[in-house]
Amino acid sequence: MIVFVSYIGTAYTQEMLETNKAHIRFFIDCIKNQKKEKLADGVSYPLNRNYPLPPIRNKSEFIKRYHEVFDAAFTQMISKSNLSKDWATVGWRGIMFSNGKLWLNEDGDLRAVNYSSKIEESKRQARIEEIRTTLHSSLKEFDQPILVFKTSKFLIRVDQMKDNTYRYASWTLPNKMSSKPDIIIPKGEFLVDGTAQEPNYRFKNKEFTYECSFNSMSEELPRYFVRIFKGKKEILFQKASLLY
């Protein structure tokens, strides 16, 4: 799962302000000289990692997992980056490095890292196989896990299949993912909605449409939420927490 969309066309980029340049220079210096303490003080926590790796929730976890996120290859990439060619400001979305491998917010804080090191990927694959053994038999076959949402009433899982479609599975709480799902909807799709390009997973089941959505910009909506429509009428809206 990538929560922050990694590519934004050049039409959206803007002229870089001197304050932005100062933030970038400071960040590059910290990476180049491995100033982990200073970097850890400028992170917008939690720093999500590719599911099912757990997010980095605080400063101590960031320092502990620093070399898993910023391995030698990524460190070199950032250290040798060209401020005018490799970095761009994208309005209220923040400061983008290398077409979205990394994002800083307007204050220079680290907001997202979409790069995945070999160490992280190895741990991620091991974790995927571990999770697979805990699922109900109807859900064991998938290519990549995407998300697990928990609302006040439901536990919801989305997986990417080998044909690049998505599968939705839902349980009524307190049932667990080892039990048979109440509903399974195959052939879902991934969309990006709005000017913020927020990830949205959409599934159709006869006249019903199920959506699992992310929000990082609007103060009017929760960070994660689930909606169900019957035709065009919204019949359910629930705030969700992202478990993985």
Image: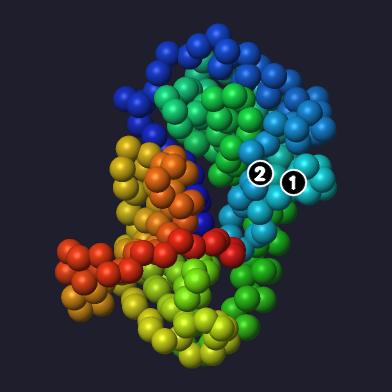
Q: Which mark is residue 193?
A: none
Q: Is residue 119 visible?
A: yes
Q: Residue furthest top?
A: 18
The relative height of residue 110 versus residue 155 in the rendered view (above or below) is above
Q: Are marks 2 and 1 in contact (CB under 8 Å)?
A: yes
Q: Which residue is mark 2?
A: 45
Q: Residue at x 61, y 25 (%)?
A: 108
Secondary structure under the numbered disc 2 in the rendered image: loop
Q: Nearer the viewer, residue 42 or 66?
A: 42
Q: Residue at x 55, y 61 (%)?
A: 242
Q: How many marks?
A: 2
Q: Which residue is mark 1?
A: 58
Q: Residue at x 57, y 13 (%)?
A: 19
The relative height of residue 181 versus residue 216 in the rendered view (above or below) is below
Within 10 Å of disc 2 (Cα), the crowding (few <14, some 14-19, many 20+) is some
Q: Is residue 76 left or right of residue 38?
A: left
Which sits earlier in the primary sequence, circle 2 or circle 1? 2
Q: Quadrant of the C terminus?
A: bottom right
User: The disc labelled 2 sits on which kind of residue?
Assistant: Tyr
User: The disc labelled 1 sits on which kind of residue?
Assistant: Asn
Q: Is residue 188 visible?
A: no
Residue 92 image point, x, y percent = 44, 28
The relative height of residue 84 versus residue 194 in the rendered view (above or below) is above
Q: Is residue 170 left or right of residue 136?
A: left
Q: Is residue 99 left or right of residue 60?
A: left
Q: Nearer the viewer, residue 220 or 27?
A: 220
Within 10 Å of disc 1 (Cα), the crowding (few <14, some 14-19, many 20+) is some
Query: Distance between the Cα atoms at labels 2 and 1?
Result: 6 Å
Q: Residue at x 50, y 19 (%)?
A: 85
Residue 112 image point, x, y percent = 58, 40
